[in-house]
Image (cartoon, rainbow, N blue to C red):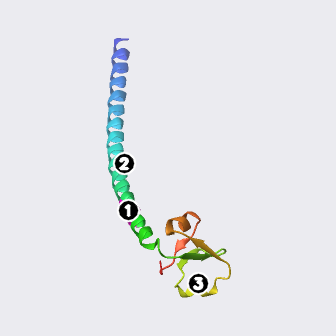
């Protein structure tokens, strides 16, 4: 009986040690994820700043896209000659929210 109790305690101790090891791994993984999230957050902020700067540069430029197309163009782009029913945008950001991507002319 004493041997069974002793073995039970040893099993519990082993389980606790295993759980502590698992917690240490999870904490390490959590720290890694936090670091990666911070890198992504920084990259996102930098990219947002670039997009805002580009948007500011284009504020005085007329942007158009075909209603059935996927790209937004400046009115000086040669591709706009073929657009029969143009859709106008005030900014690249506005066009992007509508699902358009920017042509190289933008």
User: In the rendering, which numbered label is found on residue 49?
Assistant: 1
User: In the rendering, which numbered label is found on residue 80?
Assistant: 3
Q: Name which quarter of the figure residue 56 lies in.
A: bottom left
Q: Is residue 38 above or below residue 105?
A: above
Task: State the CA–CA distance, disc 1 to disc 3.
Answer: 28 Å
- Residue 61 in the image: state x and y as whole percent: 49, 76
- Residue 50 in the image: state x and y as whole percent: 38, 66
Magenta-drawn stretch, dominant element (helix, strand or loop)? helix
Q: Is residue 18 left or right of residue 90?
A: left
Task: State the CA–CA distance, disc 3 to disc 2.
Answer: 45 Å
Mark 1 near mark 3, Cβ–Cβ under 8 Å? Answer: no
Identity of the residue furthest to the top in this view:
1
Q: Which residues are magenta?
A: 46-50
- The residue identified by callout 2 is 33
Count neighbours of disc 3 (C-alpha within 10 A) and say few if under 14, some if 14 to 19, many if 20 or more.
some
User: In the rendering, which numbered label is found on residue 99?
Assistant: none
Q: Is residue 80 above or below residue 47?
A: below
Picture quarter with the N terminus: top left
Q: Is residue 40 above or below residue 13?
A: below
Q: Earlier in the sequence, mark 2 or mark 1?
A: 2
| Local SS, label 3 | helix
- Residue 80 in the image: state x and y as whole percent: 58, 84
């Amino acid at each position: 009986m004493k041997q069974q109790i002793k073995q039970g305690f040893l099993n519990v101790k082993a389980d606790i040690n295993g759980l502590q090891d698992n917690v240490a791994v999870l904490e390490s993984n959590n720290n890694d994820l936090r670091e990666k999230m911070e890198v992504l957050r920084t990259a996102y902020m930098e990219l947002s700043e670039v997009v805002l700067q580009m948007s500011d540069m284009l504020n005085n430029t007329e942007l158009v896209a075909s209603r059935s197309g996927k790209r937004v163009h400046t009115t000086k782009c040669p591709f706009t000659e073929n657009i029969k029913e143009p859709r106008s945008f005030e900014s690249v950001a506005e066009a992007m929210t509508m699902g358009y991507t920017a042509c190289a002319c933008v």
